[in-house]
Image (cartoon, rainbow, N blue to C red):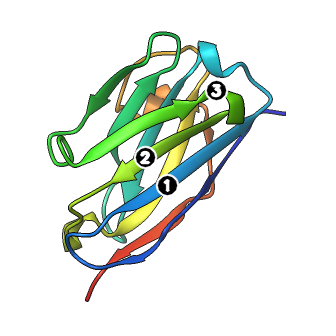
Amino acid sequence: QVQVVESGGGLVQPGGSLRLACTGSGFNLDAVAIGWFRQVPGKEREGVACLRARDGTTYYDDSVQGRFTITKDNSKKTVYLHLSRLKPDDAAVYYCALDLHGRLSLYRGSYQHWGQGTQVTVST
């Protein structure tokens, strides 16, 4: 069964850092793409970062470019989203998503499997 599970959310002060993890099962990590999305109440879920696992290519939304980094650890079958210089506007529920076709995209419709989400709160 294909599954992805997020972890690592929490409360952080503005300017701080956090690492989110997306751990998968039931698929070959080398063949897929992983996207990170976020959503706040009343707004659409938006893509912030994605990684094409076969060649390590990454892509970021302008709002997080230079502050967020997506990496993977094949041995742990885990993809990480490193969040730094966090702003209050970054507060959201963060989701990881899996595209079994391995496409590099921040489009929600490209992804077939989603995690349950992890809350990131940025506040003093």
Give the CA distance from mark 1 to mark 3: 16 Å
At horizontal 70% and vertical 37% (from top left) the residue drawn is 24
In the rendered image of this protein, does residue 57 appear above or below residue 21? above
At horizontal 32% and vertical 70% (from top left) the residue drawn is 91
Amino acid at pointer 2? Leu
Asked if residue 114 lies left or right of residue 36, the reply is: right
Q: Earlier in the sequence, mark 1 or mark 3?
A: 1
**Which type of secondary structure does the marked residue at label 2 adopt?**
strand
Amino acid at pointer 3? Asn
Residue 94 in view: yes
Assess whether mark 2 and mark 1 are in contact (beta carbons under 8 angstroms).
Answer: yes
Residue on which the image places disc 2 = 81
Residue 40, percent from left and from top = 35, 67
Question: Looking at the figure, which quarter contains the C terminus?
Answer: bottom left
Residue on which the image places disc 3 = 74
In the rendered image of this protein, does residue 32 appear above or below residue 10? above
In the rendered image of this protein, does residue 119 appear above or below residue 66? below
Residue 8, percent from left and from top = 54, 62
Q: Earlier in the sequence, mark 2 or mark 3?
A: 3
Q: Residue furthest right?
A: 1
Asked where in the image residue 19 lies, by quadrant, the reply is: bottom left
2 or 3: mark nearer the eye: 3
